[in-house]
Amino acid sequence: MPEKMLPVRRSTFAAQETLHLRVLGIVLAGGKGTRLSPLTRERAKPAVPFGGKYRIIDFVLSNFVNSGINSIYVLTQFRSQSLLQHLSEGWQFGGLLKSHFITNVPAQMRSGNESWYQGTADAIFQNINLVEQSDPHLVAIFGGDHIYRMNVASMIDFHMAKHAEVTVAAIPMPRVQAGEFGVIEADADGRIRGFHEKKPKAPTMPGDPSRVYASMGNYIFSARTLVDLLKADAKHPGSHHDFGMDILPKLAGNAPIYAYNFETNRIPGEAEGSVPYWRDVGTIEAYYEANMDLNDVKPELNLYNREWPVRSTSYPDPPAKFVFDEDNRRGQALDSIVSGGCILSGGLVRKSVLGRGVRVHTGALVEGCVIMDHCDIGRHTKLRRAILDKNVRIPQDATVGYDLDADRARGWHVTESGIVVIGREHSPVPMAAMFT
């Protein structure tokens, strides 16, 4: 337990009283992610691989650390083994400073009925002792299952400038999508007046009738306010013990609670006028499209900004290799991401994302695919619009994504838009051979 947390690095707000804020970060990483099945059949959603070398949770943790928030608890729950292993391998500080830590926290069963986390507020309440012992000024509570980059220090500046007790990150979305999100009703200065859960006719943004404010599920709380709210909510028998459903709607219009417009967030090192990137990768289609976004010549999500790196586990992989410069047998990748340890041995990869140690053999064609670590693509195989989980091996001369009925008959998951997902349990070769 840290004796004293270090102050968060400030960004723009220059008021003297904010220079030594102690900020505790809490990441909610316990979701089942059922809509991402079969990728979440054996792992929590935040542990799902993304972009070749990352996990989904790496983005929120990178946002915290890059913003100067180095005291972080990660609250885990369902199917957490893969996530715990990733945190232990890639996100452990050296221990030189007690105020620098990233610690996983399983459900403590501290509620009266000794239950799993019942909602987002209950997850924090069951660990309220960690908040009280850390003695922060502010608590940043963020979800661990979205792909985005955010300068959290700028949101903290906004929180302090407004003298807010609670600040909610909000992203403008088209009005026609209001029924898909929790919508925030706010005044022109950002003060929240109401919450509207998935209502098609929810109020639009001030001065912009074409868009609504959608809650991102990321919050800044003044620490004492958070503790008081959690204790009061825990005593309420009819509560869902959820921030979005219970606590925040009661505060709207009655307390200094504000919406922070995510579009105003700026990342150091990004080009002037760049648009902040955020994707809810809650479905196979959204997850697939977010991976495909990375292959653009100028991707909206820039993984190459050295001033705002996306951090992850460092593996001792050799460089990727492309072999055979012969007609009809040339190893090459176009508009693709190829991770360390991959060998393209006479195969062609287009518009795809390859994880670590993937092998693409002679004559194979991979188009518009997401291939996770250590998959093996056999000779003359053809893959189109497919997602392969780790260690899957596709045999020689096979086709995936060309005959969707045949793919379903093999037991593979096929989405309505025609994306084929092959989980580890549905590899085309016996399970024992997947790990050889």
Image: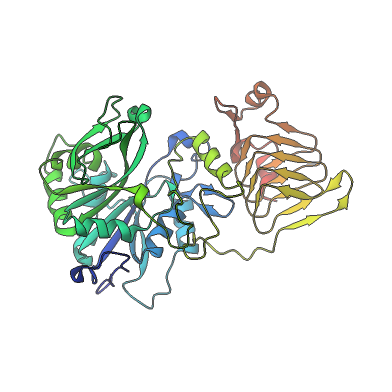
Q: Relative to 322, is 434 on the left or the right?
A: left
Front-most of 220 and 410?
220
Q: Using the rendered view, name the quadrant where residue 11 is placed.
A: bottom left
Front-most of 318 and 295?
295
Please count the marks in the image: 0
Residue found at x 35% / y 70%: 100
Q: Using the rendered view, name the quadrant where residue 24 is placed.
A: bottom left
Residue found at x 28% / y 53%: 108
Say which quadrant the N terminus sits in: bottom left
Q: Residue furthest bottom?
A: 96
Q: Residue furthest top?
A: 405
Q: Relative to 136, is 198 on the left or the right?
A: right
Residue 196 location in percent, x, y? 24, 32
Residue 139 location in percent, x, y? 25, 58
- Way the structure is coloured: rainbow
- Is residue 165 visible in the rendered image? The answer is yes
Q: Relative to 367, is 312 on the left or the right?
A: left
- Is residue 128 visible in the rendered image? The answer is no
Residue 211 location in percent, x, y? 34, 34
Residue found at x 14% / y 43%: 251
Residue 416 location in percent, x, y? 54, 24
